Structures are given as structure tokens and as C-alpha cells.
Amino acid sequence: MEPVVTKRLIIRRMAQTDLLDFLTYQTHPEVLRYTPIEPLTEERGMGFLTRQAVVEIGDEGGYIAFAIQHIGDAKMIGEVSMNLLPKAQSKGEIGWSLHPSYQGHGYATEAAQVLLTYGFAHRKLHRITSICDTRNTASFRLMERLGMRREGHLRQSQFIKGEWQDEYIYALLHDEWLARQSVIADGYNLRQ
């Protein structure tokens, strides 16, 4: 995916020069609260950024994370990611992570919409899912703002930080995304 510029953000490939910004949010306790990962070390962070800067997504699937760069602050404030399943399945899973100082301003929604467009319009996916801890209200509300619907409540599906966690799974189909784009476009035309 080529860099995408929105009103406030640039969604682009990660680079080694993002290390300090990357570690700032990837080691933040609030960001790690609902995830099974431990805070990244500088060495592991650099390894991740190095791989993500060059990874190619082929027909057999793959995981890729894109930097969310705040235009006004000229820094990486988080990431949006996509895990593509093999092409024959035509499915993907999206996720996001954002520094707490930038949460609550619509940045994750803006970035995730770019990834949905990439998945549905460019990768021709049939279905995109997302999953989160049931206590992560901000994350599942974001999924709902994106037009995703809750398809399930997975009970005690992840063992994280010494206890079993429940998760919600959300999904959006290509046709639903397309219909939503028409509604958004029609609403825009009405306001002009």
C-alpha cells in the first residue's frame, strides 16, 4: 500500500526512524492493558520495524502493520494492522494501537477506514474481522463506528496476564462496506 494522506494523518509503511515513537506507545501500560504482549525492548522494536518496512503481502496471506503519522505533530502516534488469510479465503483481520494521548480524537477511526478501503477496494477481500477484549470499550465502539457488527462473544478465549479473558469478534462484509460508502457519499452530497 502506498502512503495514504487523510485530513490529519499519513498512513504509511513503518521505518527504522520510527523507533522512539513506536516504543513510546508500545511500552505504555494503557496500550498493553488488553494485549498478551510484554513491553518491547529497543532491540525487539527495531527488529519489528525493520521487518515491517520491507514485508510484502502475497497471495498466501501475511501480517503487515502501517504507521499512523500525525501530520500536525510530525510523529508516529500508533499503528493499524492487517492480517490477510490465504487469497482463496478472501478474508482479513484488522487491528490498531494508538498512544493514549491521541485517543478519543477519531484518529484510530480515520486510520482504520483507510485499512478497510485497502482491504475491500484494493485487496478485493470478502470479509474483514476484528477482535478485542470485552473490557476494551474504546476498541469495540470503534468497530461499531466502522460499521462492523458483533458476531460473537468468546468466553475465556485468551489467557493474558495470569487470567482468562473474554473477547468480542466483529465483522464486516464487502457488500456491507460498499453500501456504507454509498450512504456516506450520499450524505456528503446532501450537505453540499
Image (cartoon, helix red, strand yellow):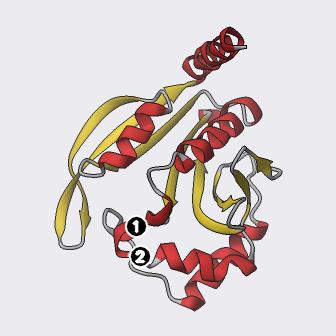
From this viewpoint, which residue is outermost toward the right? 2
Residue 29: % across, % down = 35, 75
Q: Would residue 145 be seen by someone viewing this image from the given angle? A: yes
Tell me whether the residue at label 2 lies in contact with that at label 1, contact meaning CB atoms closer than 8 angstroms: yes
Return the residue at label 2.
Answer: 28
Return the residue at label 1.
Answer: 31
Name the residue type under label 2.
His
Marking on residue 90: none
Front residue of 77/166: it is 77
Name the residue type under label 1.
Val
Residue 170: % across, % down = 40, 35
**Residue in the image at 30% along x and 46% along y:** 137
Q: Secondary structure at mark 1?
A: helix
Front residue of 40/19: it is 19
From this viewpoint, which residue is outermost toward the front? 192
Residue 42: % across, % down = 57, 90
Front residue of 88/17: it is 17
Label 2 crowd bin: few (<14), some (14–19), many (20+), radius 10 Å: some
Q: Quadrant of residue 169?
A: top left
Q: Quadrant of residue 32?
A: bottom left
In the picture provided, is 39 more to the left or to the right than 90?
Answer: left
The C terminus lies in quadrant:
top right
**Residue in the image at 31% along x and 62% along y:** 34
Instruction: Say if 136 sits above or below 53 in the image.
Output: above
